[in-house]
Image: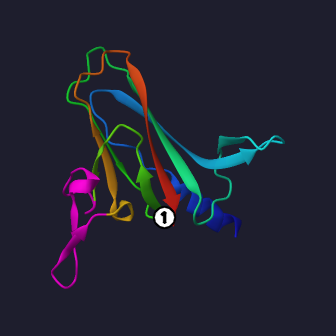
Amino acid sequence: MRTALFLFLAALLPTQALAANQVALANDVFVERVSTDAQGKQRILLEEPKVVVPGDRLVFVLNYRNAGAQPADKFVITNPLPAAVSFADAGDTRPLVSIDGGRGWGQLDQLTVAMSDGTRRAAQPGDVTHIRWAFQKPIPAGGSGKLMFRGVVK
């Protein structure tokens, strides 16, 4: 049982995001929990995912830093979504998403999924397989930042 839990948690961690230009990436994942104090005030806590169950909200954090001596131009981070997780949101960053394993990209509200009867339906967050951020400006040498997205355990 302990091995199965470890393997499940390992599957939740995004694989190393693809990067170029000597930009170092570090990925973290947290479980988002709501705590209520004695006065009834709620706080959102981010905790290490020791145990996760279907319905748990996860927060994936991608830290990047340009370790090179030159600006990282046309920088792109592509992150596959773990199969055990349904995409929820990416805050206000509006990344491109793929619903076909990384072959095609677009904004979620612009993508459609082919149905078995030949019709198409609007893509849903659960259809997302990959997330991509394409930086519009070069990352200066030594520059760093953080991106995040949320998912829900299936």
The vertical placement of 140 against 41, above or below, is: above
Q: Position of residue 118 (x, y in %)?
A: 15, 81
Residue located at (73% from left, 40% from top):
41
Judge left or right: residue 68 versus residue 11: left
Judge left or right: residue 32 versus residue 73: right
Q: Position of residue 124 (x, y in %)?
A: 33, 63
Q: Position of residue 67 (x, y in %)?
A: 37, 21
Residue sitting at the far front: 39
Residue under label 1, please give it.
84
SS for callout 1: loop
Q: Residues within 10 Å of mark 1 (few under 14, many from 20)?
A: some
Pick the front one: 41 or 120: 41
Pick the front one: 141 or 132: 132
Amino acid carrying label 1: it is Ala
Residue located at (75% from left, 45% from top):
36
- Residue 116 position by quadrant: bottom left
Judge left or right: residue 120 versus residue 108: left
* Color encoding of the figure: rainbow
Residue located at (28% from left, 64% from top):
123
Quadrant (top left, top right, bottom left, bottom right) of the N terminus? bottom right
Residue located at (26% from left, 18% from top):
71
Pick the front one: 125 or 154: 125
Q: Is residue 107 magenta?
A: yes
Point out the stretch of residues depicted in magenta.
99-123
Q: Position of residue 23 (x, y in %)?
A: 34, 28
Judge left or right: residue 71 versus residue 54: left
The vertical placement of 143 against 125, above or below, is: above
- Residue 91 position by quadrant: top left
**What secondary structure characterizes most of the magenta part?**
loop
Residue sitting at the far bottom: 117
